[in-house]
Image: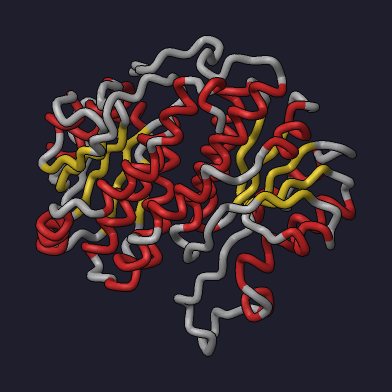
Amino acid sequence: MRAERASVVDREIAEQPAILERVIRRPAWEGLAERIVGSRPRGVLTVARGSSDHAATFFSYLALAHAGVPVASVPPSIATHYRSSPIEAREQIALGVSQSGKSPDVVHTLESLRRGGALALAVTNDADSPLARAAEHVIALECGEERAIAATKTFTASLAALAALVAAWTKNAALRSQLERVPEAAARALEVGVERAAAILASSPVAFVLGRGFGLAVALEGALKLKEIARIHAEGVSAAEFMHGPVASVGAGLPMVVLACPQWDAVPRDTAIVTKPLERGGLRALSLEAAANLSVLHNARVILLGASSDEAKSIGALAISQGTALPGELAPIAQAIVLQRLAVATARARGLDPDAPSGLAKVTETW
């Protein structure tokens, strides 16, 4: 990105490789992981809104895939409007995620879960925030002040922190080792060309962003960034759910960003749950199949993120590299950075200031 055109959000996007390296190398993970193991949790209850809720969705896939522990999102309105007594949460972990740590409904719900017996954790960029005070353990992101209205560096820092926590909790040496590659992948994601894709998105007031598995959270976040920064009505959807109805709304020329899922090989190939699509290449094959369906059968303008030029060309789509290959559960971190840059480029292509989202403030306080 060119320095003379850099906005506040540009500069904060560019900070991410260094921030991710600090988060991943933090020495405190093992102590917190031991506390989690010692609590013998039967499940995790997450509380968050907006970008932070997307980070919690990413965590839910990690915890289910690596720890086999069920994860559920608690709607904050339950604690603030429908239930005055503590929410029963014995043998649970309560995970509150908020970049500011100041949204009253998220804070109140975490407090309710803690009073109900949960081990309360907070992920926040402000270690002195009300959310941090409501928790027993705080994962401080330490990103420095995030001045741009749209969250960028705090989102990817949350993803990396939660991945590092799961790696320590499950004693997953392979995941811990793979995390070391994330900062370099983030740096490469800053170099990926997004202008051609931005021109496609800028031509329409509506778009979809599709992802599956570990990438679903980033698809949701990418759509949010297009809304916030580029003022495009973008909807983030599971690529599987999309085929159960929303696909009927696709018309010729509609922009579709599809995240190509990297292969993830944790499922043994000799188990009964393996299906033919998995045998053909898992979720990656299915995500490419969905992109082909949209491009060929529905004549949508498909942008494939994380696919090769040859893969995209074969179905008449535009490829965007994610920069550097990462394993399936970590690739979304690099893809998130590309999507952030795509939203900024789309805003500029539409003549908008990426630092001035309409009707938004940095801290949103809901109840």
Q: Position of residue 208 (x, y in %)?
A: 69, 39
Residue at the far bottom in the pictured view:
270
Q: Position of residue 49 (x, y in %)?
A: 40, 31
Question: Along the horizontal axis of the image, is 273 left or right of 310?
Answer: left
Question: Along the horizontal axis of the image, is 120 left or right of 82?
Answer: left
Q: Is residue 218 above or below residue 327?
A: above
Q: Is residue 263 above or below residue 200?
A: below
Please indicate, yes or no, whether residue 341 appears anywhere in the rendered image: yes
Which residue lies at the image location 42% right of the left edge and 13% below the top edge? Answer: 361
Which residue lies at the image location 80% right of the left edge and 51% below the top edge? Answer: 317
The image quadrant of residue 286 is bottom right
The image quadrant of residue 228 is top right
Which residue lies at the image location 20% right of the left edge and 46% below the top edge? Answer: 89
Residue at the far top in the pictured view:
359
Question: Along the horizontal axis of the image, is 183 left or right of 281?
Answer: left
* Camera-nearest residue between 20 and 205: 20
Q: Position of residue 155 (x, y in %)?
A: 40, 38
Which residue lies at the image location 66% right of the left edge and 39% below the top edge? Answer: 194
In the rendered image, which quarter contains the C terminus? top left
Please indicate, yes or no, whether residue 83 appears anywhere in the rendered image: no
In the rendered image, which quarter contains the N terminus? top right
Q: Position of residue 133 (x, y in %)?
A: 12, 29
